[in-house]
Image (cartoon, helix red, strand yellow):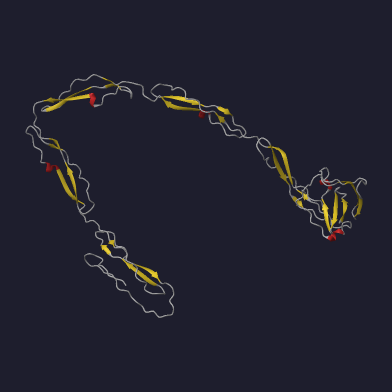
């Protein structure tokens, strides 16, 4: 139930339709938004067609609007305007053709920049751009056009292609059979990277080298001839003389090994006239470490017979004279204090108002000779801390504890508690 009125603005050429339905006024967007868009109606300023005819006069302009043709919509089209006009109050109906408030048209900003094209790489994707409302329409002014535009024909960036390399070739032959050589293997680039793909490894990474033929070449040991026997090493008595030979070619690990150092020399005894030899002793060794840190220990030192007496020479001393000992670390060892386990806490000294419970322990071993001092022998804790009621309570004491003297000798003190 209602009627509609067409309005034409001479300054802009816009045509508007206001429909009055159930005592409310609704405004249709500018006709330019619908021409050739398959939506709703197509209206022109031509002569009367299949529709009707209406006229409206205002103080500013008088125009005639012809409704050329009413075109049914091809499909429902949602309104692109995010700011639908509010219903006009009933009082404005009377101002529609009587010079009402000046219309304020919607004003929007320029389009912003297009967003990045989104979609699978190397194909067709979507992008969008937007604009904002700078002035909101009112008083029947032009409605705002679409604020968001979507383009579904943009091209996404080309897909990245990573470098692809082949598997390693087989190792080539070792450069030598023994003594240490090398062998190589290679791989090839099958696909070069493009469009920001993962780079190929450096050319030096396309070749791999390893050591081979590390076994030594087979070389047998060669030694020279024996030298003549040396002169006897003593002028009297029994001595020795020797002969040697030298290695002329060292063997490899797999060749015939060379003899040990003992195998490169020979020693045999030689007899000279008997000699008079006095006993010769070594120097005293250093004293050994003390086996204890206190309480008295022993450090010893010794010497040995280097040359025993022979041929009537001076004899060696008896074995007991070959060792010597001294007392070490004779100071008294410190004795640390030791205490017993804590006793059970005594009963609380009061039933309320805050009292004490006590427990004690005794000294089992008194400290001596700078030993660790004894810890506290008494410990107290608070108990029955709740306030007392107004009932008189007499003070009570527990029995005195026993105590021990603080020292084992000399003047000390004995402490007891209750």
Percent coordinates x, y for residue 307 in the rendering: 13, 34
Rendering quarter of residue 349? bottom left
In this view, 128 is above or below 399 = above
The answer to whether residue 113 is visible is no
Report the side of 348 relative to 300 (left or right): right
Percent coordinates x, y for residue 206 in the rendering: 52, 28
Name the quadrant of the N terminus.
Answer: bottom right
Report the side of 182 relative to 286 (left or right): right
Q: Nearer the viewer, residue 223 or 164?
A: 164
Residue sticking out furthest to the right: 47
Percent coordinates x, y for residue 356 in the rendering: 37, 71
Report the side of 11 relative to 264 (left or right): right
Q: Nearer the viewer, residue 116 or 93?
A: 93
Residue drawn at x 48%, y 28% as measured from the top left: 208
The answer to whether residue 24 is visible is yes
Q: Nearer the viewer, residue 300 or 174?
A: 174
Residue sticking out furthest to the top: 225
Percent coordinates x, y for residue 410 in the rendering: 21, 66
In this view, 35 is above or below 403 = above
Residue drawn at x 72%, y 40% as measured from the top left: 152
């Amino acid at each position: 139930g209602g009627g509609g009125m067409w309005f034409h603005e001479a300054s802009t050429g816009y045509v508007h339709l206001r429909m009055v339905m159930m005592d409310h006024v609704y405004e249709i967007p500018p006709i330019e938004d619908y021409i050739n868009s398959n939506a709703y109606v197509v209206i022109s300023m031509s002569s009367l067609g299949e529709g009707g005819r209406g006229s409206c006069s205002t103080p500013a302009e008088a125009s005639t609007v012809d409704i050329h043709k009413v075109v049914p919509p091809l499909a429902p089209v949602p309104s692109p305007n995010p700011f639908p006009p509010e219903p006009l109050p009933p009082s404005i109906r009377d101002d529609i053709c009587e010079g009402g408030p000046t219309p304020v048209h919607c004003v929007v900003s320029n389009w912003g920049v297009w967003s990045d094209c989104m979609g699978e790489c190397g194909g067709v994707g979507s992008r969008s751009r937007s604009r904002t409302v700078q002035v909101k329409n009112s008083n029947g002014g032009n409605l705002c056009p679409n604020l968001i535009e979507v383009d579904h024909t943009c091209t996404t960036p080309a897909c990245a292609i990573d470098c692809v390399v082949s598997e390693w070739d087989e190792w080539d032959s070792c450069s030598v059979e023994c003594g240490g050589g090398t062998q190589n293997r290679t791989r090839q680039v099958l696909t070069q990277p493009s469009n920001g793909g993962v780079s190929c490894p450096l050319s030096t990474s396309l070749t791999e080298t390893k050591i081979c033929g590390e076994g030594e070449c087979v070389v047998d040991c060669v030694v020279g001839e024996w030298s003549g026997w040396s002169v006897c090493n003593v002028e009297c008595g029994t001595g020795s003389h020797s002969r040697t030979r030298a290695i002329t070619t060292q063997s490899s690990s797999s060749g015939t090994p060379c003899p040990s150092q003992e195998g490169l020399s020979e020693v045999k005894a030689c007899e000279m006239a008997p000699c008079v030899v006095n006993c010769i002793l070594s120097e005293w060794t250093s004293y050994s470490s003390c086996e204890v840190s206190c309480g008295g220990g022993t450090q010893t030192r010794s010497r040995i017979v280097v040359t025993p007496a022979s041929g009537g020479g001076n004899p060696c001393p008896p074995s007991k004279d070959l060792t010597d000992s001294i007392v070490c670390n004779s100071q008294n060892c410190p004795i640390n204090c030791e205490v017993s386990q804590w006793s059970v806490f005594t009963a609380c000294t009061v039933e309320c108002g805050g009292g004490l419970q006590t427990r004690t322990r005794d000294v089992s071993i008194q400290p001596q000779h700078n030993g660790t001092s004894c810890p506290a022998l008494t410990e107290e804790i608070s108990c029955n801390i709740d306030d007392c009621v107004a009932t008189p309570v007499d003070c009570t004491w527990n029995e005195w504890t026993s105590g021990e003297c603080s020292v084992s000798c000399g003047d000390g003190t004995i402490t007891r508690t209750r």
